[in-house]
Image: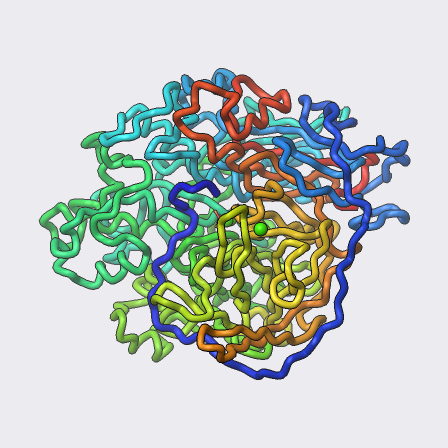
Amino acid sequence: MSDRIDFNDEDSNRSANPTFDSVLANRLNRRGLLLGGVSAAVLTACGGGSGGGGVGFPILPPAPAPAPAPAPAPGPAPGPVEKLLGFGAVAKSLADSVVIPVGYSASVIYALGDPLSGTTPAYANDGTDTDFENRGGDHHDGMEWFGLGADGKRSDSSIDRGLLAVNHEATTDETLASFFLHANGGTTTLPRPAAEVDKEVAVHGIAVLEVRKDGAGKWSYVQDSAFNHRVTPLTEIDIAGPAKGDALMKTKYSPTGVKTRGTLNNCGTGKTPWGTFLTGEENWVNYFTRAAGDDTARGNDKSVTSLKRYGRTAGTASRHGWESAGADDKYQRWNISKTGASTDGTDDYRNEMNGMGFVVEFDPYNKSKLGVKRTALGRYAHESIAFSKPVVGQKVACYMGDDARNEYFYKFVSDAVWSEADANPVDPLATGAKYLDQGTLYVARFDADGAGTWQELSLSNPAVAGFAGYSFANLADVVVNARLAADAVGATKMDRPEWCATNPANGEVYLTLTNNSNRRIEPASSSQLAPDPANPRVYTDMKGATAQSGNPNGHILRMADAGGNPASTSFRWDVYAFGAESGANADTVNLSKLTGDQDFSSPDGLVFSRSTGICWIQTDDGAYTDVTNCMMLAALPGQVGDGAKKTLTYQRADSTQYTVDTMIGKQPTADTLKRFLVGPSGCELTGLCETPDGKAIFVNIQHPGESTKQANLADPSKYTSQWPSNAGYGAGKRPRSATIVITKDDGGRVGS
Ligand code: FEO
Ligand code: CA
Ligand code: CA
Ligand code: CA
């Protein structure tokens, strides 16, 4: 990240939940050695990758040139010679390029501003473009594949035609304006001009676009496909589940509290077992403003408690100042101050923020259907949504993180049990209602010795019903204020839960904890936390002359529900891997003993391939970016409990010791964890989906050049990235978020 305000790192949990201050001091020395010398790829700047036939791409194929490709495998099944993670590891890189292994090709297929209708002009990329409702949005994030058959209908076996449903999370800004979208960088003072705001609003949300592979194996999107469409923060959306029609949801726009406008800060994604798209709303809180006197205007009622818990104290400015663009409701909705005289909020937007922060379900095949906010899954800073493997006759579970410092990890379990007839339903959103509108929301408490429990968030739980910090009126109040309910049950405060994903091999759930600058051995304020078994590291990592303290590199947790039953309320857990620099102390920081081919920092995106079983790990980092751009690694992990307990011993200032026992998974080897890709300057890697044969993966490059100074807009040589124009993709030199497709030159599965 740059030195700007990090809108992706909210910090408002001041609840007094317990941490695990001390556990057994029984030290277990694990044998481990630094693996090294594994053939690291050497970068040479030469032309585009072979075989893709797409636009020129600044892939940097390591020398020497690839060996002649063997004959392509005949079908989706792997050939007998396939070795997963058989590729040569990609070295860390600061190049403004996508770097992939020898034998692979990549090309850009869909970038910010690309036209999504046959009549929309090509993207000029100079700030003059408009009509973003018919163009690619910004900051590509989570993404899912939905196959299309030759008949133009859903096909789960199609490998050459499909829809990509893409999250467009945010835009690049320095002060208010999304400066790459405006010819002169835009207005950095209030009020913001409506024409600028209209563009900025429209680049948020989601896109659905058709992609196809031609006879030569080249992938591209179909500009005039009838499936293409955008959903923006102004598109009407239905509210479903416990909060539908509740007093908390009533606004001037929807006096009955059954609808809202749009979806915002769409980060991680999910794909339901019934074939719909789920998008998680993450850092929406920053888009709303609240007047300095609003606590008093609200009579200091319990809505003030809720607003503070979700990070909107009175007198907070909004990220872009959209509320300043005019009197029209579409601008005024971003001001959540109580301005009306009504008692129920139907004459203003005091409740508007209660309409954001959900998982939203869409039928990607049917753009005429409104999206649906599934409020039963809780309101917080959502990342991805990972489903348990559906088993006939069993309840269906999905797992979800809340990405902010010291926030929580959640699970929702349906009331309905799975029926195979629902795998390909006539009315997919009705099936969504069946499994996602009635059920039980839980939050995770991670205990010592690798044990943990799921705490129920409902008024049936006395800890929720009797919570002194907030009086819940009903289940709607519990799900809308899920963070407060989670505080009530003593959930474990985590190091920023990002994506989670389910290992198809065994049903275990993996969770990235990206980093936490608020961990301290001796917490000095209510925002700081001592390490605990599941968030056990506190250390200082240097970035140049800057000391980064807490858990700057993050870790990846995994958990197994008891008995393999996703409805269980207990689980086992361990840490699959700790992010670290390979040269960091292996006894205190590099606990997974990562080598130079494996080291990473700030894990974020996490997706298991349903074809190869590979666990793809993507980073969104600012801690190790003095050495390498963000990256993607391929992993073949084992299972919970395949490692051992480890005691970390810390010295307090008074020389007493503080110890934490954690559970560390088996040390990765050169055959089980390897860097596959490094992205261009300033980007994060996020979002991954694949064709069902595993032979093409789609990956998103978000916000290259994010740290560019707005004052340098007129001088492209001062952009901190010119990707993907430096790859020959599109007009102009302004950097653009984009989707790339990666294939293996020998026709094999990606990751082999
Ligand atoms: Fe959108 Fe927490 O990343
Ligand atoms: Ca460092
Ligand atoms: Ca993320
Ligand atoms: Ca992140």
Q: How is the image coloured?
A: rainbow
Residue in the picture at 34% in, 49% down: 285
Q: Which of 182 and 388 is in front in this view?
A: 182
Q: Position of residue 340 (x, y in %)?
A: 12, 46
Q: How many labels does the image show?
A: 0
Say above or below: 256 vs 302: above
Q: Nearer the viewer, residue 559 or 566?
A: 559
Quadrant of the rendered structure where residue 328 is?
A: top left
Residue in the picture at 47% in, 26% down: 135
Q: Position of residue 471 (x, y in %)?
A: 25, 70
Q: Is residue 271 visible?
A: no
Say above or below: 727 vs 166: above
Residue in the picture at 30% in, 75% down: 467
Q: Where is residue 416 in the image (x, y as percent from the top left)?
A: 50, 65
Quadrant of the rendered structure where residue 245 is?
A: bottom left
Say above or below: 593 vs 354: below
Q: Position of residue 94 (x, y in %)?
A: 62, 37
